[in-house]
Image (tube, rainbow, N blue to C red):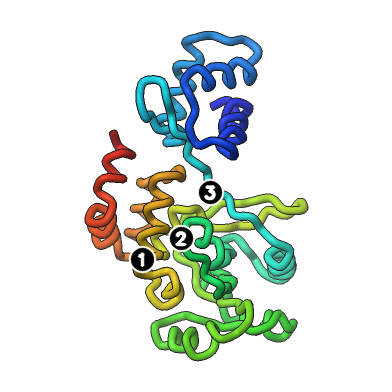
């Protein structure tokens, strides 16, 4: 896929979520030095296969967004401190507020989650406590989850440490020359389904709204998503949930 062509499509999507076949061809002409009809055809097929565009009719396409969360200064500071002290090979950091862009109502409760190798969780916990990073909580099992309601959700911008699931879908985003590991959307959706205690504020109607918005408007790798659900021991239940609630949406995706 020509990166310039893809960038122009995503830039167009910031203002309009649909695009005509003619406009796609014009964007392609502006992106490559040597324009050919066959090259455009194969580029279009690749866009469809990667679910970046979805055909509405013979002349109109819907552009799907690629999820990339906006990182803030506090996330950068946390990452820089941890990177200077620990091996961050299997690690990611995310904020509960990232779900708000998919939901109908904005959940004001906001917390940061650091997922890291189980052997490192306690060291990270005590390091952040010692360095006065605010309210920090260690959640390793079901018994620890009682802390969430009693203390963590009452704190202002708490940090929650938990173990990383192996092979969890994550990506690296660059911020001020630092590569920060964050979840893919596929991971966020599975976690939303599985984590009943941590993400309780996004359950019920909000969970349905978030899932629907993501399925219809964002690029999703279902193979990646179901593989992670399997890692979490919930693949069958997650698939049943999706088909019971979003059969029409899923049919649109796989038409």
* Residue 167 in sight from this viewpoint: no
Query: Which comes sooner in the sequence, label 1 or label 2?
Result: 2
- Choose between 22 and 37: the one closer to the eye: 22
* Residue 79 in sight from this viewpoint: yes
* Residue visible at 53% across and 27% down in the picture: 1
Q: CA distance from mark 3 to mark 1?
A: 22 Å
What's the mark number on residue 104? 2
Residue 227, given in percent of the width and then of the height, sits at: 36, 53
Q: CA distance from mark 1 to mark 2?
A: 9 Å
Residue 204, given in percent of the width and then of the height, sits at: 35, 69
Q: Are marks 3 and 2 in contact (CB under 8 Å)?
A: no
Judge from the rendering whether residue 84 lies leftward or rightward of residue 69; answer left or right. right
In this rendering, the count of numbered labels is 3
Name the secondary structure under disc 2: loop
Residue lying furthest bottom in this view?
150
Name the secondary structure under disc 1: helix
Up/down of 22 relative to 96, above or below: above
Q: Residues within 10 Å of mark 3 (few under 14, many from 20)?
A: some
* Residue visible at 48% across and 23% down in the picture: 20
The part of the image, by quadrant, that contains residue 115 is bottom right
Q: Are marks 3 and 1 in contact (CB under 8 Å)?
A: no
* Residue visible at 50% across and 17% down in the picture: 22
Disc 1: which residue: 205
- Choose between 2 and 169: the one closer to the eye: 2
**Considering the image in quadrants, where does the C terminus appear?**
top left
The part of the image, by quadrant, that contains residue 57 is top left
Disc 3: which residue: 67
Judge from the rendering whether residue 146 lies leftward or rightward of residue 232; answer left or right. right
Q: CA distance from mark 3 to mark 2?
A: 17 Å
Q: Are marks 1 and 2 in contact (CB under 8 Å)?
A: yes
What's the mark number on residue 46? none
Residue 189, given in percent of the width and then of the height, sits at: 41, 58
């Amino acid at each position: 896929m020509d990166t310039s062509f893809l960038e122009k499509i995503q830039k167009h999507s910031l203002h309009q979520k649909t695009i005509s076949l003619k406009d796609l061809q014009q964007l392609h002409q502006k992106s490559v030095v040597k324009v050919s009809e066959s090259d455009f055809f194969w580029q279009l097929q690749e866009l469809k296969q990667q679910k970046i565009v979805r055909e509405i009719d013979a002349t109109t396409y819907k552009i799907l967004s690629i999820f990339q969360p906006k990182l803030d200064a506090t996330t950068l500071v946390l990452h820089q401190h941890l990177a200077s002290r620990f091996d961050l090979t299997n690690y990611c950091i995310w904020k509960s507020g990232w779900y708000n862009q998919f939901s109908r109502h904005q959940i004001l409760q906001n917390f940061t989650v650091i997922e890291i190798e189980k052997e490192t969780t306690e060291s990270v916990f005590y390091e952040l406590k010692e360095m006065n990073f605010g309210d920090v909580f260690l959640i390793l099992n079901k018994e620890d989850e009682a802390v969430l309601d009693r203390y963590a959700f009452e704190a202002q911008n708490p940090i929650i440490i938990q173990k990383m699931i192996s092979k969890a879908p994550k990506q690296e985003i660059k911020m001020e020359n630092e590569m920060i590991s964050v979840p893919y959307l596929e991971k966020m959706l599975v976690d939303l389904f599985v984590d009943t205690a941590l993400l309780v504020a996004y359950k019920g109607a909000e969970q349905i709204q978030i899932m629907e918005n993501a399925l219809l408007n964002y690029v999703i790798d279902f193979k990646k998503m179901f593989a992670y659900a399997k890692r979490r021991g919930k693949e069958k239940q997650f698939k049943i949930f999706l088909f019971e609630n979003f059969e029409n949406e899923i049919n649109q995706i796989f038409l």
